[in-house]
Image (spheres, coloured by chain):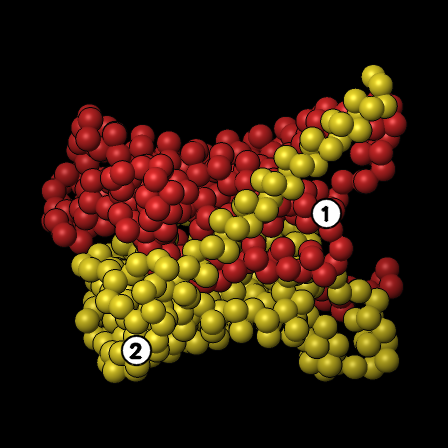
Amino acid sequence: MGAAPASRDVTSYGMGLAAPLALFFLLFFVAPLLQLLWLSLHNDTAGLHWGLGQYLHFLTDPFSLGVLGSTLLLGAEVTAVCLVLGFPIAWLYQRVGPRLQTIIILIVLLPLLTSVVVRTFAWIVILGRQGIINATLQSLGIIDTPLKLLYTQFGVVIALAQVQMPLMTLPLITALGRIDPNLDDASCSLGAGSWRTFFRIVLPLSLPGVIAGCTLTYAAAITAFITQSLVGGGQMLFMPMYLYQQASTLQNWPFAAAISIIFLLAVLAVVSVFTTLGRLSRGYGWA
Amino acid sequence: MSGRRLILEALSFELVMTVIAVIALVIIIAPSLVVLIVSFTSGFSLRFPPPGYSLRWYVELWNAWQLHFAAKNSLIVALWATGLSVVLGVAAALAISRSQTLSARLLDSLFMSPLVLPALAFGLAALMLFSLVGLPVSPLTLVIGHTVVCVPYVVRNSVAALAQLEPTLLESSAVLGASRLYTFRRIVLPLIRPGIIAGAFIAFMSSFDNVPVSLFLRDAATDMLPIRMWQDLEGKLDVTIAALSGVLIIATVALVAVMERVTGLSRRLTS
């Protein structure tokens, strides 16, 4: 076998098979993004004068910075809610029999595969003035006038958390499944209580899954155009809608391009922070 | 620490975790159930619980030609984008799955990057490029745009399926005199087929439901279903949309059940 040339290796395929998709991505993914960058570096709408005007405009405008800040904050809030609710689901999944496991997975998967407009629409029905929450609270006599839930930060966070929950739960289930169950027993037999075992053993060992889940949830939450716009309403503006308004309604393409690039860089920055944390946590997990 | 205290602690821990998990599962499932129930209302508003039940909004849906038109467009684009994603994605997965070279890893990152980058930014970028080269917005531009954001699902699932394929099977096949193409057709393809189908299914669902890319790459002639629904909902809360949502939820549940049977979808997404 050692004498056989590499081309005779029957267990692998040539890199040439990746060429069509690579070419497709160069033409229709890399080239458009480069053009976006090129346009964002122009001061006028026609794209004739080079300059950093669009970026200066964004970075010196309190309104634009506010939109960026509230978008990043929104992502953090959604990620936190998903983690707090998603971790117990993954924990329960490892505790139950195979039949219940399949049911849990299918429940978790359902929002991932249901239309995002449908999921968001459901939250409008639930959070609205005559929605379930207000109707229940009123019939119980807890409140007199309906609470404002729709078009609030709370509404957007809870709706997004439900929509993005699978992205958090699936990596957590995978991560918890890889932890040796004997460690749990060992910790308990050495006298550590369940809470201590959880925070000192289970949580640190599941960090790669936590970080993978947080990365996906965060990126999805800040780019979730439909849920943000329908549950947030007109008063709350986040980066995707800001970008869309500038590009579509105002036809200000260079500024929209600059918003896109800043948004892209913000997402990339957050993802690389999470990736670095992931690398560190793997070291911690093995220690 | 005393044994009794440990037991109490274990009980409190299990109780807290189970209660949160159950609440979370209810939060996940409740919206779909609520929409399903509301869609059978006999009234004109989205009140819950409905004043009475009827199929009137499903009948109304039958006549909503604008929604039919948008649904047909979405279906056609999703089928083409899925087909293109499978052809390009499976070929790329074969090339990069067993290779440890730098170029293979770079290509893998490139093919996965549409999953994290904001799709809206890509939609705008694609529109700019197409208008620069003079390609007008059409079903073709939609298929191209959707393929970029759907192909990662096919690549990822195919790579995962290939990783579980025993290399010795390919060697045995070759030793027994089968050509590479024959081995691919009779050994590789049947073994990785569930992975490809699972990837294609998720790609199809995400194309059918895509808003950010379609938003820039469609016009009135290529109206897409999720955008039509979004625009209808921005204007008023329409019970017809609830009926349409009901249809979509039932179709999704049915498709997921079929996929679970055919490909073991739940195992594929958690391993």
Asked whether, in this view, residue A170 is left or right of residue B11, the answer is left
Between B103 and A241, the residue placed more toward the observer is A241
Give the residue displayed 35% in from the left and 37% down from the top: A142
Asked whether, in this view, residue A204 is left or right of residue B24, the answer is right
Secondary structure under tag 1 reads: helix
Q: What's the amino acid at mark 1?
A: Gln
Asked whether, in this view, residue A8 is left or right of residue A250, the answer is right
Question: Which residue is denoted by mark 1 in the rendering?
Answer: A94
Q: Colour of chain B?
A: yellow
Residue A236 image offset from top left, x and y in percent: 24, 39
Question: Which residue is denoted by mark 2 in the rendering?
Answer: B56
Between A156 and B10, the residue placed more toward the observer is B10
Residue B175 image offset from top left, x and y in percent: 86, 76
Between B119 and A75, the residue placed more toward the observer is A75
Q: What's the amino acid at mark 2?
A: Arg
Using the rendered view, name the quadrant where residue A31 is placed.
Answer: bottom left
Quadrant of image for the C terminus of chain A: top right
Using the rendered view, name the quadrant where residue A198 is placed.
Answer: top right
Crowd tier of the residue under label 1, counting other residues whose Cα lies within 10 Å: few below 14, some 14–19, many 20 or above: some
Residue B103 image offset from top left, x and y in percent: 58, 51
